[in-house]
Structures are given as structure tokens and as C-alpha cells.
Image: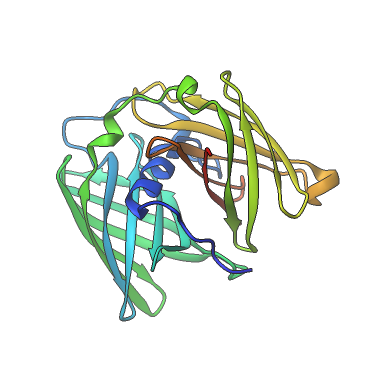
């Protein structure tokens, strides 16, 4: 299946998605809601990347514990999701376990990450893959510092969701409590919950469970979510073994 089109700026999409990065899969540290330090790479970073001669819009969200998510897109179409754990020392941020999930490509690609940052200002660095590197530059998005609110996201949404297998349309109904249900255009039913992270940022912890009878599997994906503009919502997560990722963008009518 083909990647799905993002109907908002990539920066806004990744902002919501990546800011919510706290509940990533794979037993990561991202379930910890501790605050950030004075010099920290935490935040949403939006900019551009160059890989093998191609240019991409990219947004990277780094949580207070170093867990991160990223989205890269070309021509307004999401191409894949980045996820991993990192650590900082002084003004450098690095990660040795990054995974790139290109939508529709059936398998993830490992990478390592190294970057230099100025807190709440700028970040630049490179991702090292087997056989090639990707460079990126980004600036801080202050919207990350706005607290998440469940009452602001309650309602019915429609849009698209994707993974390594591809993408499909989806409709979600979110309650003021944070619980939600949804169904995709392929008939797969999902349910789950959203809860604001305690750090006071624009991030929700996310848990999504697939209905085994309609989806063919009963797995639970954990990750993050956040607002995109006034009526949009972006979400991302990974399976517990980090073998696949889940990304979506939905809007209210």
C-alpha cells in the first residue's frame, strides 16, 4: 500500500506525534514522566534532512528521558517513522538503537544518531545507516511547552494510519476520559486510551489494542499522541518488540 498524504504541515504533524512520544514500545524508558534539565535536547525539532541526494521535511521529538520519535516526508506525503532511545552529554545527543520504519517497505532499517543542540533553539546532526548517512537541521517548536488536555481532543476524527505494511483510512471516536474506539477501511477495529503525560508538555501517552477477530492480531501498540493545529491529532507508537511501528493523522470535521 502507498504512504498516506499528510493534510497539515509536516512540522505540525510531527509536533503532535513526537511530542507525545512518551509511551514508546520495547520496554523503553519513555513511560517515565520526569522533567527536563536546563541543558536538554527535549522538545520538538522541525526542519529538513538530506539522504542519498533526496530532500525531506523532518520533525524529531525528543522526550525528557531521551526516547524519541521522528517523521520524515516528501512532497507532503509521509515516508516513514523514526524511533529510538538516546542520551545527551553537554550539547550532544546520540542514539545507538534507532529504527527507521519506511511505510510499505515490510521491514525496519537500523541506524545510529549523533547530533549537536542548543536547548530550545537548534539541532543538527546525522543518522548513520549501513552504506549511507542522512544529515538534518532543525529548530525548536515552542508549542511543545503547552500542556496536553483531554477535553480539547474529545470528538470524532477521520484520517489515515500506517505501518510497515502500508496505510488505510481510519475513523476514531475519543471520549473526554481519553478512551477511544476506531475502525479502519479494511474493517479492523481498535480500542485504546490517551492520557496526558505528567511533565506538563503537549504530549499524551497512547495505548492501542487491535481486535484479533477483525484485525487478525490482538497486539497492543504503545506510543504517544498530540494535537496538530486546532482540529487535528497525530499519533505514533511501536510494538513491544519494536518490529513494527504505527503512525496516524486524523482530523475533526
Residue 55: x and y, percent? 31, 72
Residue sitting at 58 percent across and 69 percent down?
A: 2
Report the coloring of the rendering.
rainbow
Residue 103 or residue 158, whichever sits in front: 158
- Quadrant assignment for the N terminus: bottom right
Q: Is residue 28 above or below residue 69?
A: above
Residue 29: x and y, percent? 45, 36
Q: Residue furthest right?
A: 213
Residue 8 or residue 211, whichever sits in front: 8
Q: Is residue 16 above or below residue 178?
A: below
Res. 71 visible in picture? yes
Tell whether 209 sits left or right of 146: right
Res. 29 visible in picture? no
Residue 3 or residue 154, whichever sits in front: 154
Residue sitting at 22 percent across and 38 percent down?
A: 40
Tell whether 89 sits left or right of 223: left
Residue 149 or residue 107, whichever sits in front: 149
Q: Residue furthest front?
A: 253
Residue sitting at 39 percent across and 61 percent down?
A: 72
Quadrant in which residue 129 is drawn: bottom left
Tell whether 191 sits left or right of 27: right
Residue 214: x and y, percent? 82, 47
Q: Is residue 218 above or below residue 196?
A: below
Q: Is residue 181 above or below residue 138?
A: above
Residue 207: x and y, percent? 60, 34
Residue sitting at 59 percent across and 57 percent down?
A: 163
Quadrant in which residue 67 is drawn: top left
Number of numbered discs on residues:
0
Amino acid at each position: 500500500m502507498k504512504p498516506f498524504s499528510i493534510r497539515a504541515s509536516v512540522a505540525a504533524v510531527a509536533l503532535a506525534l513526537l511530542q507525545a512520544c512518551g509511551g514508546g514500545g520495547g520496554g523503553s524508558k519513555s513511560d517515565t514522566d520526569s522533567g527536563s534539565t536546563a541543558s536538554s535536547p527535549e522538545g520538538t525539532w522541525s526542519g529538513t534532512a538530506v539522504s542519498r541526494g533526496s530532500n525531506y521535511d523532518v520533525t524529531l521529538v525528543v522526550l525528557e528521558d531521551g526516547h524519541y520519535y521522528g517523521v520524515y516526508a516528501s512532497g507532503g506525503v509521509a515516508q516513514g517513522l523514526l524511533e529510538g532511545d538516546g542520551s545527551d552529554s553537554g550539547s550532544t545527543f546520540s542514539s545507538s538503537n534507532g529504527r527507521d520504519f519506511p511505510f510499505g517497505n515490510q521491514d525496519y532499517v537500523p541506524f545510529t544518531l549523533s547530533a549537536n543542540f542548543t536547548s530550545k533553539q537548534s539541532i543538527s546532526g546525522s543518522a548513520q545507516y549501513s552504506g549511507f548517512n542522512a544529515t538534518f537541521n532543525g529548530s525548536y517548536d515552542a508549542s511543545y511547552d503547552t500542556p496536553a488536555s483531554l477535553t480539547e481532543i474529545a470528538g470524532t476524527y477521520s484520517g489515515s494510519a500506517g505501518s510497515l505494511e502500508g496505510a488505510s483510512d481510519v475513523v476514531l471516536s475519543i471520549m473526554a476520559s481519553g478512551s477511544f474506539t476506531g475502525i479502519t477501511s479494511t474493517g479492523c477495529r481498535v480500542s485504546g486510551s490517551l492520557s496526558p503525560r505528567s511533565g506538563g508538555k503537549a504530549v499524551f501517552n497512547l495505548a492501542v489494542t487491535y481486535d484479533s477477530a477483525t484485525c487478525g492480531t490482538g497486539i497492543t501498540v504503545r506510543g504517544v499522541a498530540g494535537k496538530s493545529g486546532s482540529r487535528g491529532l497525530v499519533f505514533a507508537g511501536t510494538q513491544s518488540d519494536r518490529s513494527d511501528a504505527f503512525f496516524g493523522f486524523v482530523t475533526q470535521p
